[in-house]
Amino acid sequence: MNMLNPSTTRQLAPWLIPGLTVLMLILFVLSLGIGYAAFDLAGAMGDVLQGRQSLAALVFSELRFPRAFIGAMVGFTLGLSGAAMQGLLRNPLADPGVIGISGSAAFGAVVVFYWGLAGTFSLALPLGGIAGAMLAAMVLFRISGRGATTTTLILAGVAINSFAGALTALALNLAPNPFAAVEIMYWLMGSLADRSLHHVWLGTPLMLLGWLLILSRSRALDALSLGEDTARSLGVNIVGLRRVLVAGTALAVGSSVAVAGAVGFVGLVVPHLLRPFVANQPSRLLLVSGLGGASVTMAADMLIRLIMVRPELKLGVVTAIVGAPFLFSLIWKLRRNEL
Amino acid sequence: MKIEARDIVFRTGDADILRDVGLTVFGGEVVGLIGPNGAGKTTLLRILANLLEPAGGEVRYDGKAIGKIPASEFARSVSYLAQGNLVHWSLRVEAVVALGRLPYANGFRAFSADDVAAVQVAMAEADILPLRDRNFDTLSGGEQRRVLLARALAVRGKILLADEPGAALDPYHHLQIMELLARTASSGVGVVVVLHDLSMAARFCSRLVLLDQGRVVADGTPDEVLSDRHVADVYRVSLERGGSNSSFVIPRDRL
């Protein structure tokens, strides 16, 4: 990306991207190895590569691999889109939830639950989530056209989010039976358990497309740091930028919510944590937050499997329990700096 | 490059912000847009920068209608320095200046040797090389202003539109910025600058355009525009003059 000259990178940590990539890969391998039953990872991988239909191979390809892979993809998506939203809205408190994408994707999936479609075919749930995210993106597109301010965009997102939340609550309220309500509740908490290769195939292409859309606008996000007028004078099409970023976020986060449910705080906290390491530059923060998000999400998911609480803790619960105090500490630090 | 603005009309709701405003700027000139608060100076500058669309009239760059110039070409030809020192994230100084090269290296394209050179030259011109690794919010107001001006210079445009580049600066840094604008113009760039400081306007601008209530009251050399009558009518103040050719003016009494 922005490798202007050696001096540009002087204050930036050159180890950051390689370091985070290695960390992510280590966590990925550890995530493959950690589970409730003893597991010979090397043997299982050998079986898979040689096409042997052993139990270990099945556990690897149907349980361990999808769980670790989706964890990395979902985490990358949340970190990347969180950084993109913070850059677009120029607000450190923004995340994919602020523009209503996560809430609408969750509602889309809840509709599938509610009508009992989740059992009819395995992809109904993810497709419902993606449809919800797309619907929210379309409403935002209508609103974020020419002349709309960032405040309008945030307000529209908050409205969409509230409405999606209200409709989700309505679905719970009218749930045909308590089991359906519990199923919806559990799903809303976010989890990587029992995901299969189907979910990998469904989620991955759309997430990759979303990432590409977001990353293609990284420099425009830098320009936006100087305000919309200056960004426009540098040739940035603000309406186009918003649309590409909202579309990228909707595709990536929609698919992420669709395969893993609602996982909070990663998109908010990870960019915050890493921003000082990239000298606050929105373009550099994107990839770094993606890598950080993937690591944090896989680590949280491993924690769930290691602490052996039954029933298994949900991923969204763990990220919120770890993330919220962290946010408090950030606010505390901010307050101290203000004094 | 030549800018021609003709019969520009701009309205917000029922209020006429600009009425039949015309302006011509040639390369090598420093044209000062002056006038009291609310006269329409910033609006006119934003119309010239294609950031606002006028309700009437037209702006042409080298005879070409502003709307017909491709956005990337326009961004390379015309650089715009907005009012104030707004930078949302505390970026490094060099990263801020490098944003001036965005019209040349958008998307995934990397910065070229030309871009690197332009950034270095712009930082040297604005005298901010020692600040290059500092974060923007650790700088003083004057330093921030110079960094943002360097960002605008890094575009290497043929036209520079600057909105109050010296606002809130001490005399030393204000002079430094005005000298820099004059030097930029001497290399053939057309500079349009919104100013409140009449003494700076008188000294550094080759031409002044005096706006009042959305109309051009006077357009000419500083001597012609800053006549006692114009200043009294528009600003409601009297001027004290001094120096050779009355090259400095100081507002003295309210009328």
Image (spheres, helix red, strand yellow):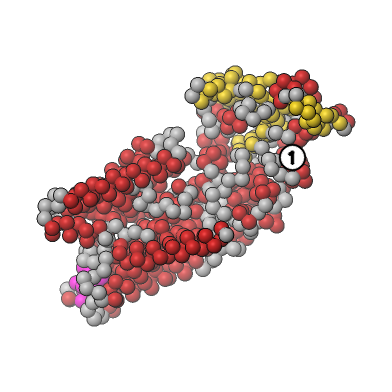
Q: Is residue B159 above or below residue A283?
A: above
Q: Is residue A28 above or below residue A215?
A: below
Q: Which residues are magenta?
A: A56-64
Left or right side of A47 for A229: right
Q: Which residue is pictured at 60% across the width and 39% down the height?
A: B82
Which is nearer the eye, B99 or B92? B92
Q: Is residue B227 visible?
A: yes
Q: Is residue B23 above or below residue A56?
A: above
Q: Position of residue B113 (x, y in %)?
A: 61, 52
Q: Which residue is pictured at 53% across the width and 22% down the height?
A: B15
Picture quadrant of residue B214: top right
Q: Is residue A236 above or below residue B3?
A: below
Q: Main secondary structure of the magenta part?
A: helix
Label 1 belongs to which residue? B178
**Amino acid identity at mark 1:** Met
Image quadrant where one finds the C terminus of chain A: bottom right
Left or right side of A17 for A186: left
Left or right side of A180 for B218: right
Q: Position of residue B140 (x, y in %)?
A: 67, 52
Q: Position of residue B67 (x, y in %)?
A: 52, 28
- Asked if residue A62 lies in the magenta stretch, the reply is yes
Q: Residue furthest right?
A: B244
Which is nearer the eye, A60 or B9? B9
